[in-house]
Amino acid sequence: MTEKFDFEKALADLKAGKPITGKDSVLGPLVKQLTEAALEAEIDTHLAQEVTPNRKNGKSRKTMKSTSGEFELDTPRDRAGTFEPKLVKKHQTHVSDEIESKILSMYGRGMSYRDISGHVEELYGISVSTATLSAITDKIITEVKEWQQRPLDSHYPFVWMDAIHYKLRENGRYVSKAVYTVLGLNMEGKKEVLGLYLSESEGANFWLSVLTDLRNRGVKDILIASVDGLTGFPEAIKTIYPETEVQLCVVHQVRNSLRYVASKHQKMFMVDLKRVYRAVSREAAEQALDDLEDRWGQKYPIVIKSWRNKWENLAVYFKYPEEIRRVIYTTNSIEAVHRQFRKLTKTKGGFPNENSLLKLLYLGIQNASKKWTMPIQSWNLTLSQLAIFFEGRLDDALEL
């Protein structure tokens, strides 16, 4: 028979400084008593529902680990062997989803397995091996796969795309691979990561597969896609979303331009360049670009040529009012996600496989998305403007 929890002894232990939870805690015996009582209730219910004759057949004992310390749990058995306890399953040795939850939380904050193991032992008095920690975090992989295949909304007014690079082990050596993040702004004006895609190189075929994936998961239309000069993207998107406008990131274009300008000229060059991308209209911007070429074209022809070659996609934002311009002229919206990724992975030199990287980035997305509870600034006004500029294309999503 289960020993009753001694409240007077527990009170005395508390006064003596014994912890309430953790290893050798005051509540350990109570957890044992409550768990065994629940198991007895489970087997009584099971036997009452049995059609063929069956009865209790003693108990089996196993050592359980919980947030309140270790204890010996007596689990009732039945003669027919049909009883399957639900509270504590037959091969379960932990009474604690909480521990796994905390492990995943620590892992999702970029802590190493060694640090996590130390924290778990300190908090719960339980020694957890690296293999066990890996098995726990690997449970996320199924969740990641489901997340990657989840249905998406039919319309996204804005989508941003950018890449971040990592080292992955492949065939005995580490190779650099890009993770392409696709971030969308939904019809409620809230950010949502639509997908993560790994590739060694980009190109029209790669982007065609990404955009096909979005289409297959339910995305019917994207109004404007903001990207950072992704090779092959403008060509690929025309085959899947032919009406989508592509805006190249102006901020990245400016940064890349300055790499080819001598440091002694950068300040003066930027004064002239700002007149281009901060112009009130496309016409004014093109005049400023002509002036930039007149002044700097001889010294930095490669920079001017880059602006000329990309101008059609760089200048898209000029046709829109300020509310839309500030959303699309840069991919900085996706930088918040990538900052979260870098925070989690800064202590990792490389990853043994794709899953080990994806599960960490997925947890990073969950952390970042906790802040995306509100629409972006002036969303109702922006949506009204979009409905005018892209007449008819949002009607289904707006239920008009």
Image (tube, rainbow, N blue to C red):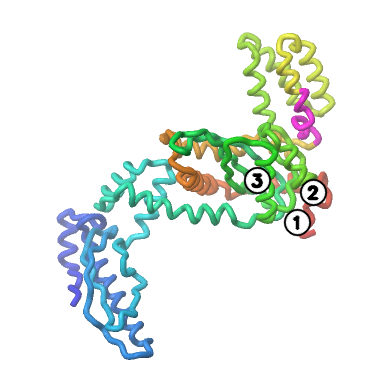
Q: CA distance from mark 3 to mark 1?
A: 26 Å
x, y percent for residue 203: 67, 36
Q: Earlier in the sequence, mark 3 or mark 1?
A: 3
Residue 116 lies in quadrant: top left
The answer to if 52 sits in the magenta stretch is no
The answer to if 310 sits in the magenta stretch is yes
Q: Depth check: 40 or 53 in front?
A: 53
Amino acid identity at mark 3: Val
Q: Please tell me whether mark 3 or mark 2 is closer to you in this view.
A: 3
Cβ atoms under marks 1 and 2 closer than 8 Å:
yes
**Which quadrant of the rendered structure holds the N terminus?**
bottom left
Q: Please tell me whether mark 3 or mark 1 is closer to you in this view.
A: 3
**Which quadrant of the rendered structure holds the C terminus?**
bottom right
Mark drawn on residue 210? 3
Mark 2: which secondary structure? Answer: helix
Q: Which residue is mark 1?
A: 398
Q: Which residues are magenta?
A: 308-319
Query: How packed is label 2: few (under 14 Cα within 10 Å), some, or many (20 or more)?
Result: some
Query: How packed is label 3: few (under 14 Cα within 10 Å), some, or many (20 or more)?
Result: many
Residue 226 lies left or right of residue 146; in this view the side is: right
Q: Main secondary structure of the magenta part?
A: helix
Q: Depth check: 230 or 160 in front?
A: 230
Mark drawn on residue 387? 2
Mark 3: which secondary structure? Answer: helix
x, y percent for residue 325: 73, 36
Q: Residue at x 73, y 14 (%)?
A: 301
